Amino acid sequence: MSMFGRGPSAPTGPVNSERMEMAIQELDMVTDIFNRLVSTCHAKCISTRYTEGDLNKGESVCIDRCVAKFFEANKKVGERLQNVGANAGGGATGAFGL
């Protein structure tokens, strides 16, 4: 099956507008995360003076670390928000359960 739901096992009925809206929202969120990642790591790791066409070793290492930290922070925030959501009815004491 293709990414767009076209293929041998694709449903042939009408498009579910609710699912389409959810897919659009998810795509918007992924695009936003990607754009923030690029902006943050580019500003932190890439010199404003472009002297070479390729990244040098220092820039490459910096970007690798920046991306890893960005996703780790994103993961921790997501986990914390899920815990807060799960504990919302269970008497969380404050913001983020603190």
Image (spheres, helix red, strand yellow):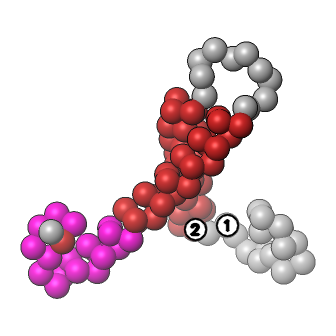
Please provide the residue range marked out in magenta.
Answer: 79-96
Q: Is residue 91 magenta?
A: yes
Could you say where residue 64 lies in the image, as x and y percent from the top left? 63, 48
Judge whether residue 20 can be spotted in this image: yes
Residue 92: image quadrant is bottom left
CA distance separating discs 2 and 1: 8 Å
Do the numbered discs 2 and 1 sit on residues whose CB atoms are within 8 Å? yes
Q: Nearer the viewer, mark 2 or mark 1?
A: 2
Residues 43 and 17: in front is 43
The prevailing secondary structure element of the residues shown in magenta is: helix
Name the image quarter holding the N terminus: bottom right
Instruction: State whether residue 28 is above or below residue 39.
Output: below
- The label shown at residue 19 is 2
Could you say where residue 87 lies in the image, as x and y percent from the top left? 22, 80
Residue 60: image quadrant is top right
The single residue placed furthest to the front in the displayed view is: 58
**What's under tag 2, amino acid-wise?**
Arg
Could you say where residue 13 lies in the image, as x and y percent from the top left? 73, 75
Label 1 residue SS: loop
Q: Which residue is mark 1?
A: 15
Judge whether residue 29 can be spotted in this image: no
Question: Residue drawn at (18%, 82%), measured in percent from left and top?
Answer: 89
Instruction: State whether residue 97 is above or below residue 53.
Output: below
In the image, 62: left or right of 6?
A: left
